Amino acid sequence: MINQDIKEILLTDDQISKRVAELGEEITKDYVGKDIVMVVLLKGAAYFATDLSRAIDSNLRLDFMVASSYGNGTQTSGCVVVSLDVKESLAGKHVILVDDIIDTGTTFATIINLLKSHNPASIKTAALCDKVERRINGLQADYVGFTIPDNFVVGYGLDYAGNYRNLPYIGILKPSVYART
Ligand code: IMP
Ligand code: MG
């Protein structure tokens, strides 16, 4: 039972779905008459992005990137490697880059730079969780679900070493779990 590895539930599935609906409404209002391409960072943002996209009432195309900076630990390596790139044409489009969580800000900063070379009409960012106090580059996301304290969290797409993404809530992992691996 993966529930047993969770020390504390930080965000319930109910809190998450309410907040995702609010973000969807906000984005819908901000993008009236605009075509959105949602660029989703796999695998973590898959859960958030599919829910968020269904809460947005605009013309929207979905695309995916795989960008990783984490090994199997809980600290970023600082170097972001892209192993799957976008397929949609982004030129002249309104891009919303979506991730599960912002930590140091390195992933978003790196990917925004890469996406700029496609000449989109605009690029904004959305993240379900934001550990603001961990930021090293001043990056501020445009749409943030929840600002959370500096704990390693899992669930609703967020993983530890590839596991726990399928928890319906977001919880703080027991430190004893890291010790095991
Ligand atoms: P950043 O590049 O330092 O902002 O880190 C962002 C990436 O680190 C996200 O795409 C997540 O995959 C991962 N990450 C950061 N904090 C957590 C966490 O608490 N749980 C799971 N993944 C995290
Ligand atoms: Mg990630």
Image: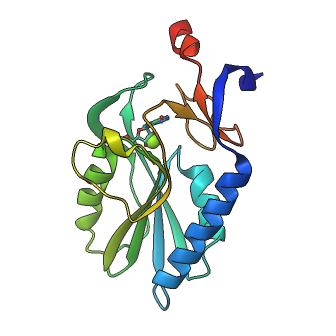
In the figure, is residue 11 to the left or right of 68?
right
Tell me which image quadrant ligand 1 sits in.
top left
Q: Classify 173 as above or below 115.
A: above
Q: Is residue 69 left or right of residue 11?
A: left
Question: Residue 65: image x %, image y %?
Answer: 43, 52
In the image: residue 21, left or right of residue 32: right
The residue positioned 57% from the left and 11% from the top of the image is 176
- Residue located 45% across and 38% down the image: 149
Q: Residue at x 47, y 77 (%)?
A: 36
| Residue found at the very far top of the displayed protein | 180
User: Looking at the picture, how far across and down is residue 164, in whole percent?
Assistant: 64, 31
Asked whether residue 60 appears in the rendered view, the answer is no
| Quadrant showing the N terminus | top right
Q: Residue 11: x percent and y percent?
A: 64, 44
Can residue 109 be seen by looking at this rendering?
yes
Query: Residue, x 53% and y 76% (percent of image)?
Result: 26
